[in-house]
Image (cartoon, grey):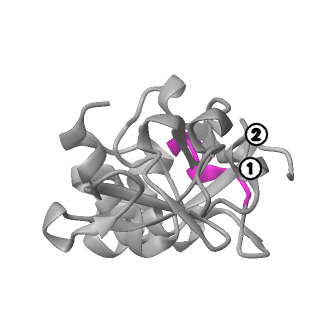
Amino acid sequence: MNKDELKKIYSAHLPYGLTGELKYDITEDFQDEDWVQDLSIFKKGAIWKLAGYADHDLNIPMGEGEFSGWLWRNGNTYAGIDEAVKPILYDLSYLTKEIEHEGETFVPFNILSPKIRHEIEFSKLPAIGDFKVKDYQKLLELHFNVFGLPEGQFINKATLTNK
């Protein structure tokens, strides 16, 4: 995933609390930082939440020099760790399956507009450009892989075990 693709995906998901899982252990990168209170949050499998984007014009001090990029949050700790995070998303095949979101269980198909439900029911999943804006927003809110990331570039939320 290049920087432009990442910017498109993360900016669309930002208002909806996108989470990601660390793909590998990065504790070594942070063990000498005096601001880090708990190194366990930098271990493989730790869950982080996308917090925002810092432009170099904001002059956010992050260790040596300034920081420009996506910020991820774990508790009270913020870090620029894009390269180590895989977003947690539902595959579009789960539109017609029961999912859990914010403690509620339902089939996303049932809350989409009639046109999209018809297309899904009688053919294949429509191209993302065929969704109405409100459907698109709903799918982002539910953390669906609306940008078609390949399987290896995201973690399927439906297959995650509770951590």
User: Is 98 a magenta residue?
Assistant: yes
Q: Position of residue 69 (x, y in %)?
A: 29, 54
Q: Along the horizontal axis of the image, is 158 left or right of 1?
A: right
Q: Along the horizontal axis of the image, is 130 left or right of 106?
A: left
Q: Earlier in the sequence, mark 2 or mark 1?
A: 1
Q: Position of residue 138 (x, y in %)?
A: 45, 71
Foreground residue, 45 or 65? 65
- What's under tag 2, amino acid-wise? Thr
Residue shown at 26%/71% (left/top)? 133
Foreground residue, 5 or 131? 5
Q: Residue 67's image quarter?
A: bottom left
Q: Mark number for residue 39?
A: 1
Residue shown at 50%/53% (left/top)? 144
Gap in angstroms between the C-alphas marked 2 and 1: 26 Å
Residue shown at 25%/56% (left/top)? 68
Instruction: Specify the segment rendered in magenta.
Output: 90-99
Q: Mark number for residue 58?
A: none
Crowdedness near tag 2: few (<14), some (14–19) or many (≥20) residues, C-alpha within 10 Å: few
**Residue under numbered circle 2:** 159
**SS for tag 2?**
helix
